[in-house]
Amino acid sequence: MDTSTIWTSQLWWYLARAGGIVAWVLLAASMIWGLLLSTKLLGRRPHPAWVTDLHRFLGGLSVVFTAVHVAALVLDSYVSFGPAEVLVPFASHWRPAAVAWGVIATYLLVAIEVTSLLRHRLPRRAWRATHLLSFPLFGLGTLHALTAGTDAGTVAWQLVLAMAGATVLGLTAARQVRTRPYDGAGDGLKGGPGDATAAAGDARQAQLARARAVAGSRRRR
């Protein structure tokens, strides 16, 4: 094996590692930011648009880097992942359980992002129920990061995972204490970390509608 082949093989492996780490960091950041908004710890006054858009942006970026992570794994020749190994849980011959958590987390991530993009076309109950999958998504993604890959055994990485997990648990507990169960439409669901962004988006749409109505009445005068 010549030097260029070795370098290419290592490139895909390092890209897979970097893509996975960045995807998890973005997922954790999106989760924590959404919980900060839904617990009202950032204040109860209306936030600027970028505050709520940041939650969606972080979630979207996590999808992009998850795709980079998966594609680099398929292209890497060290472990020899194929389409089945990255798409079917427990199909991998290399750490099947650890890889399965990542496969399932990927499906949850895609489901959450797709329904978020289609939120205004979906029943609110369906969107809320799907968005609650953010919690098992974060748990499975963290379990995958803790059990798979070269960096799983490093103390620094374990500390990062532990601190993020403790933060999410603390904010989730705070949200349960500070908020009441959602009783709209009779579904009785408590919303996930995206509820604040959804509410802010609805409020912004209503504000724009009022502004258009005022502008239209002035033109008629």
Image (tube, rainbow, N blue to C red):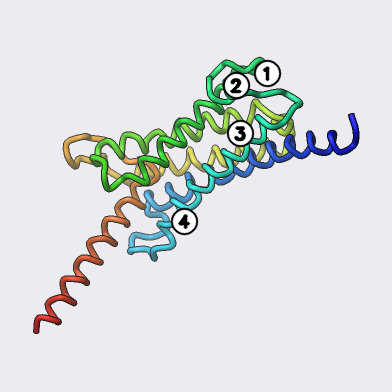
Mark 1 element type:
loop
Seen from the viewer's position, the closer of residues 2 and 163 is: 2
Distance from the alpha carbon under mark 1 to that under mark 2: 9 Å
CA distance separating discs 3 and 1: 15 Å
Question: Which amino acid, by three-letter code, is at mark 2?
Answer: Glu
Picture coordinates of residue 185 (x, y %)? 17, 39
In which quadrant is the C terminus drawn? bottom left
Question: Which circle, 4 or 2, is nearer the viewer?
Answer: 2
In the picture shown, does residue 123 fall above or below 51?
A: above
Contact check, label 1 and label 2, Cβ < 8 Å: yes
Label 1, on which residue? Answer: 94
In the image: residue 140, left or right of residue 12: left
Q: Which residue is mark 2?
A: 85
Depth check: give the residue in front, 60 or 173.
60
Number of disc labels: 4
For label 2, the SS is helix
Q: Is residue 194 left or right of residue 62?
A: left
Q: Is residue 78 above or below residue 21?
A: above
Choose top left, top right, bottom left or bottom right for residue 50: bottom left
Q: Do callouts 3 and 4 mark residues in contact (Cβ within 8 Å)? A: no
Instruction: Please give the residue where the numbered disc 3 appears in the rendered image.
Output: 70
Which residue, given by chain and number where applicable, does mark 4 sit on? 54
Amino acid type, label 4:
Leu
C-alpha distance separating marks 3 and 4:
24 Å
**Image spot of residue 113 (x, y percent):** 42, 42
Q: Earlier in the sequence, mark 1 or mark 4?
A: 4
Residue 79: which quarter of the image? top right
x then y, percent, for residue 44: 34, 60
